[in-house]
């Protein structure tokens, strides 16, 4: 019973952090809300018995990726966002889409709630096996992802750089 209560509490924290991420006007506050979402997801993984995934969630996403996000936000010197009225297409398609998705999730949860649960830690997936797959079988996608992150950093640096302007004729002495 305690696991269920903790799961629901951290699920609510995750949803609240996600809503806060969307509501915030300052990008740094949004990034910190994303850290809350990722940390609460790590706790959810712990409660499900996936300790390795929880550790990866904290180290890779809440650690490295968020440092990268904050670095890019600071590099671009992004200020507060301006509020706009929004798109009418997003309201026409988005609101019914969210409602349909929510109803679908509720229907699946209600339909599957009577089935037996898997015992804690009964699923296969030792860290050694996961490491072998990551660094042998899936090495190319892993390295391509790191190159993609590097390209994103270089793109942010390029966008943040001020263009060189030639000196004006009034500034020359001669």
Image (spheres, grey):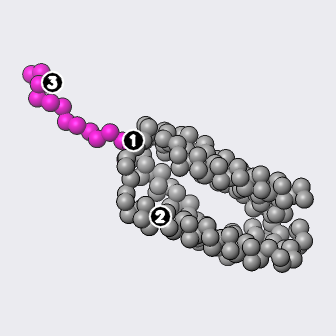
Above or below, comparing residue 133 to residue 156 in the picture: below
In this rendering, does residue 80 appear at all? yes
Q: Which stretch did the figure color magenta?
A: 159-174
Dot placed on the residue nearer the N-terminal end, 3 or 1: 1
What residue do we see at 49% from left, 45% from top?
A: 72
Marks 3, 1: nearer the viewer: 1
Q: Dot 3 corresponds to which residue?
A: 171
Q: Quadrant of the N terminus?
A: bottom right
Q: Quadrant of the C terminus?
A: top left
In this rendering, does residue 124 appear at all? no
| Residue 108 image point, x, y percent | 70, 75
Residue 109's tag is: none
What residue do we see at 46% from left, 57% from top?
A: 151
Marks 3, 2: nearer the viewer: 2
| Residue 153 image point, x, y percent | 48, 51
Dot placed on the residue nearer the N-terminal end, 3 or 2: 2
* Residue 125 colored in magenta in the image: no
Spatial CA distance of label 3 from label 1 is 37 Å
What residue do we see at 50% from left, 67% from top?
A: 96
What residue do we see at 42% from left, 46% from top?
A: 157
Q: Residues within 10 Å of mark 2 (few under 14, many from 20)?
A: few
Q: Dot 2 corresponds to which residue?
A: 94
Above or below, comparing residue 20 to residue 172 in the picture: below
Left or right, residue 117 beside residue 138: right
Q: Dot 1 corresponds to which residue?
A: 82
| Residue 130 image point, x, y percent | 76, 70
Kindly state the secondary structure of the residue where label 1 is placed: loop
Above or below, comparing residue 127 to residue 167 in the picture: below
């Amino acid at each position: 019973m305690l696991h269920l209560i903790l799961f629901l509490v951290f699920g609510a924290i995750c949803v609240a952090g996600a809503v806060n991420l969307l509501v915030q006007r300052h990008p740094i506050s949004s990034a910190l809300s994303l850290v809350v979402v990722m940390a609460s997801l790590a706790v959810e993984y712990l409660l499900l018995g996936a300790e390795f995934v929880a550790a990866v969630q904290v180290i890779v996403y809440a650690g490295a990726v968020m440092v990268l996000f904050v670095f890019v936000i600071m590099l671009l010197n992004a200020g507060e966002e301006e509020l706009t009225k929004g798109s009418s297409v997003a309201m026409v398609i988005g609101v019914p889409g969210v409602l349909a998705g929510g109803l679908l999730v509720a229907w699946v949860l209600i339909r599957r709630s009577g089935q037996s649960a898997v015992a804690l830690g009964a699923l296969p997936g030792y860290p050694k096996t996961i490491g072998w797959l990551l660094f042998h079988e899936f090495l190319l996608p892993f390295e391509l992802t790191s190159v993609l992150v590097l390209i994103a950093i270089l793109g942010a640096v390029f966008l943040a750089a001020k263009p060189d302007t030639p000196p004006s004729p009034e500034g020359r002495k001669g």
